[in-house]
Image (cartoon, rainbow, N blue to C red):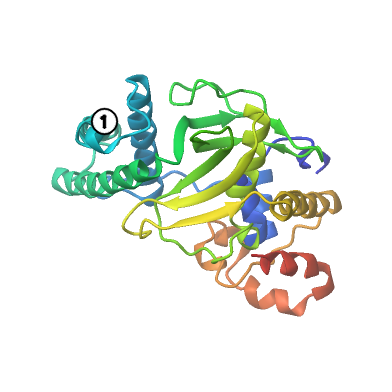
Amino acid sequence: LAAARLGARAYSATALQKFAACPYQFFLSAICRLAPRSEVAPIVELDPATRGHLFHRVQADVMRALADEGRLPLRADAFESARATLDRTLDRVAEQYREELAPAIQRVWQDEVESMRADLRMWLEQSAATHAQWEPIAFELAFGLPPDAGHDPRSVEAEVTLPDGFRLRGIVDLVERQRGGSDLRVTDYKTGRDYTRRNLVVGGGEMLQPVFYGLAVEQLLATRVVESRLFYCTRAGGFSERLVPMSAETRSRGPEVLGLIDRAIAAGFLPPAPRARACGICDFRDVCGPHEETRIRLKDQLRIAELRALRDRP
């Protein structure tokens, strides 16, 4: 497992979040890189992952088009033309996805697209309302990933290495600069429901993007990040946001979580120790079995004390 330690290879925040849900799930997914077998089946309705990809692609393309035309930050008198740009972008991207996915029922597909259009219009309106304070400067800013036409021009192939030696890779949905200043804010868009805790920092180890992306962007752009946020930008998420100020406590919490995961890898101690209800949404029940939530109670609780403490952190 030495080659899997956090200083030996880069991980994404999404991969690292699996550790808090269940260390064995993290081992199978992030270290062994197992995944469910792809099944060929007719597309009737969009699965959440595909819908999220399409949604994020439209968001980035719209903002990039507005930036290229010098229309950012958005003003109230320019909103109608910006919405027309959004509609054209959604139509173009949805058509590309339609050709690739070949949905079985065209009417259902069109209903999905129109539902996304309503959410995207509300997202654009809410985004425009923040532009008086925050000016968008980067969209889909990638680090530690191969070049891609959909990534921001400031993206880099190099991974981000934190002062502790832990290596990270990922894509930041949005970077904004404070109007009249140089401080930055990073945003991770979410298209699902908002189940986060009110005083979010690392979300029990399962919501690491705000802290890690804030630290990564500071290194990439050599500018202070003062705030990170999760923006649940659909009706399902209630268009809510969770703000994470990049305080001294927040900055220390991220490396603490990474250190805990790294120690577990070094010790080879990645047991099936799921949090409550984690087994019900796990891809690896056929490998592991459905009764680990019960079986873990019979094992040495001292060895998973750090894991339990992580799950209690806001």
Can you give x and y, in whole percent of width and height, for residue 5 in the image? 79, 42
Residue lying furthest front in this view? 180
The amino acid type found where label 1 is placed reads: Thr
Q: Which residue is mark 1?
A: 89
Residue 300 visible: no
Q: Residue at x 29, y 45 (%)?
A: 125
- Quadrant where the C terminus sits is bottom right
Q: Residue at x 83, y 68 (%)?
A: 303
151 and 50: which is toward the camera: 151
Helix or strand or loop: what does disc 1 sit on?
helix
Residue 297 sits above or below residue 131 on the image? below
Answer with the quarter of the image where residue 106 lies: top left
Residue 104 sits above or below residue 93 on the image? below
Can you give x and y, in whole percent of width and height, for residue 24 in the image? 68, 58
210 and 66: which is toward the camera: 66
85 and 131: which is toward the camera: 131
Q: Residue at x 40, y 44 (%)?
A: 130
Can you give x and y, in whole percent of width and height, for residue 153 in the image? 50, 20
In screen coordinates, is 2 left or right of 273?
Answer: right
Residue lying furthest left in this view? 107
Label 1 environment density (alpha carbons within 10 Å; few <14, some 14–19, many ≥20): some
Q: Residue at x 55, y 30 (%)?
A: 142
5 and 268: which is toward the camera: 5
In screen coordinates, is 207 left or right of 123?
Answer: right
Answer with the quarter of the image where residue 184 lies: top right
In screen coordinates, is 78 left or right of 232?
Answer: left
Residue 153 visible: yes
Can you give x and y, in whole percent of width and height, for residue 113 in the image? 22, 44
Report the label total. 1
- Quadrant where the N terminus sits is top right
In screen coordinates, is 236 left or right of 262?
Answer: left
